[in-house]
Amino acid sequence: MESLLNHSYSSTPTEITGERHTTGIMWFTNDLRLHDNATLRAAGQQCDQLVCVYVVQSEPSHHQQLARQHQRIECGLQGVGRNRLRQQFEQESLGSLSHGLRLLGQELLILQGAPLEIIAQCIQQYRATAVFSSVNAGWYENQTLYQLKQHYPQLALHRYHTHTLFEPAQVNLERGFAQTFSKFRRQMESVGTIDAKAPVSKLPPSPIFDQSANKQGKNKGVNANYVYIKSKEDVNSPGLYSSSLVSSEEKFTGGEYAALDHISAYFDTKKRLPSQYKLVRNALDGWEHSTKLSAWLANGCLSVREVVKILEEYEGICGANESTYWIYFELLWREYFQWYAHYYGLYLYRFSGIKKKKPLTSFYPQRFQQWCEGTTPFTLVNACMIQLKTTGYLSNRGRQIVASCFVNELNLDWRYGAAYFEKTLIDYDVAANWGNWQYLAGVGADPRGKRHFDLKKQTQQYDPDGIFQKKWATNVTDNNLILDAVDAADWPLDPDSNRASL
Ligand SMILES: Cc1cc2nc3c(=O)[nH]c(=O)nc-3n(C[C@H](O)[C@H](O)[C@H](O)COP(=O)(O)OP(=O)(O)OC[C@H]3O[C@@H](n4cnc5c(N)ncnc54)[C@H](O)[C@@H]3O)c2cc1C
């Protein structure tokens, strides 16, 4: 395990200094909020002028590009790096952030392109001497910052842990990382969490927009493919779910405002949903059966420290029980995978995982396509995959079921499943996604090795009356589809000709 230590936590340094800068850049990434945002607070305190920037990724992620190059997949991974629902959530989140910043006299520059080029361009154009950015567990995100530092050795990089409950000193990765979640949980339960901080209420002005020019639409934006969202109201979003299967209240609207609205609704002391969480959290469907906080947490519209603060306030009024504890327990799972990603670095994405043990799975384009489209021989899996495609969300139970089917029944290379989730989940989080997939595929942190969910038992337990399956997979019934289409001589057939023959 020694060699793994070389990457990992050293890739995410936190620099906290009190130095002043004439112009700094606040590069928003996974921290699209004003509340409990240590990075934005420091940027505001240390700069005379501040350029607030967000870079929209227009290209497929590195993982998806690789997956396509290697296997020439023309099915589930086609199109841009994130699907329409993810893009919409991101856009709503940016509209909300933009609105919040405007109230403080700031402006958000939203630029599209390669992050390294865009941030480098901003540094040059505004003669910035510092970049403020929250720590991200993703390998490529960190590489961008290191490359910037190489290009501009004088540049001050200020990074803060805004995505986690704990600080590096509390987790102390220098001493190693807990091999199992249980060990990590026991270790961290005795450590106090950091208090969530109040929203930023004051920021220095932006050098980009002077108010009069702004009114006439003459802003001096950087010379890049320029996307500017004016305010929350300007984002004309019809709501995330287009499906008639989902009621209008049950939707993930991006942004800090929506996140705070949702959390106060879930922790409403009259409804008492958190007090029943553990009893219902495994349900396959149902808006109120789990917290539904993941999309806001993943995009940083909501601080996990704020969630714990609200949870503790709720317990203070309604009393703590096993269910309220279990919400914290699940947040510790999230925490575990965040530090796991910091610690293991590139091994998060490797086929043989952190166990360095290659699974006996491979890649079968037709099976992969069937899984993505929800046309496998397994109705429960199909229902889950159609729900995912339609809404951008899948329950934790559903994710475990489809991931287990992916590696066990379909014998597919887990990384393609993770890449498809990356494209499709509106709550996509690099650490939670790749860490959970490794766990399910038997190359991650599961001390028991690979998990295999018995699909029949899962159906009996979680959808005995078939309500979930009828709702999401109406036209498909068990065993009316075959896995691999072959001709009489056992040659693989084109998936489309297979479907036509059904
Ligand atoms: C194969 C697979 C891939 C996944 N990919 C993601 C992902 O990209 N992003 C993501 O946020 N979660 C991921 N999860 C974890 C989990 O399924 C979701 O966090 C959860 O379903 C979100 O719904 P919720 O907010 O109602 O969760 P709740 O049950 O209400 O849990 C509360 C919070 O705890 C955290 N959490 C719960 N379970 C886990 C877990 N197993 N791992 C990490 N954090 C957890 C989430 O932040 C969640 O919002 C994945 C799980 C699996 C099995």
Image (tube, rainbow, N blue to C red):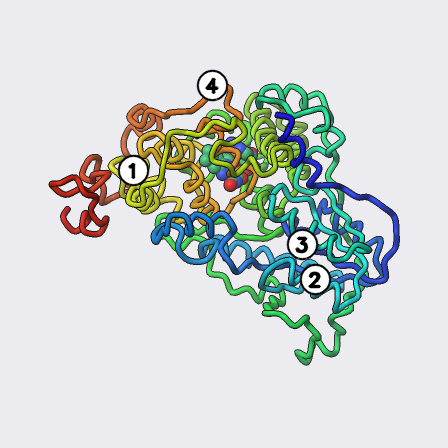
Residue 365 vs residue 207, the one in the foreground: 365
- Do labels 1 and 4 touch, CB within 8 Å? no
Tell me: residue 417, above or below residue 251: above
Tell me: residue 482, above or below residue 56: above
Badge 1 amino acid: Gln
- Does residue 102 appear left or right of residue 68 in this picture? right
Mark 1, other Cα within 10 Å: few <14 / some 14–19 / many ≥20: many
Q: Horizontal and vertical percent for residue 294? A: 54, 41
Q: Horizontal and vertical percent for residue 59? A: 51, 58
Q: Which residue is mark 3?
A: 28
The mark lying in front, picked from 1 and 2, is: 2
- Do labels 4 and 2 touch, CB within 8 Å? no
- Do labels 3 and 1 touch, CB within 8 Å? no
Mark 4 element type:
loop
Badge 2 amino acid: Ala
Residue that sits furthest to the right in the current view: 19
- Does residue 15 appear left or right of residue 369 in this picture? right
Q: Which residue is mark 2?
A: 120
Q: Which residue is mark 1?
A: 469
Regarding residue 202, the answer to whether it shows in the image is no
Q: Which residue is mark 4?
A: 448
Tell me: residue 1, above or below residue 98: above
Mark 2, other Cα within 10 Å: few <14 / some 14–19 / many ≥20: some
Identify the residue at horizontal 69%, vertical 55% (top origin).
Answer: 27
> Separation of disc 1 and disc 2 at Cα?
50 Å
Q: Earlier in the sequence, mark 3 or mark 1?
A: 3
Badge 4 amino acid: Arg
Mark 3, other Cα within 10 Å: few <14 / some 14–19 / many ≥20: many
Badge 3 amino acid: Phe
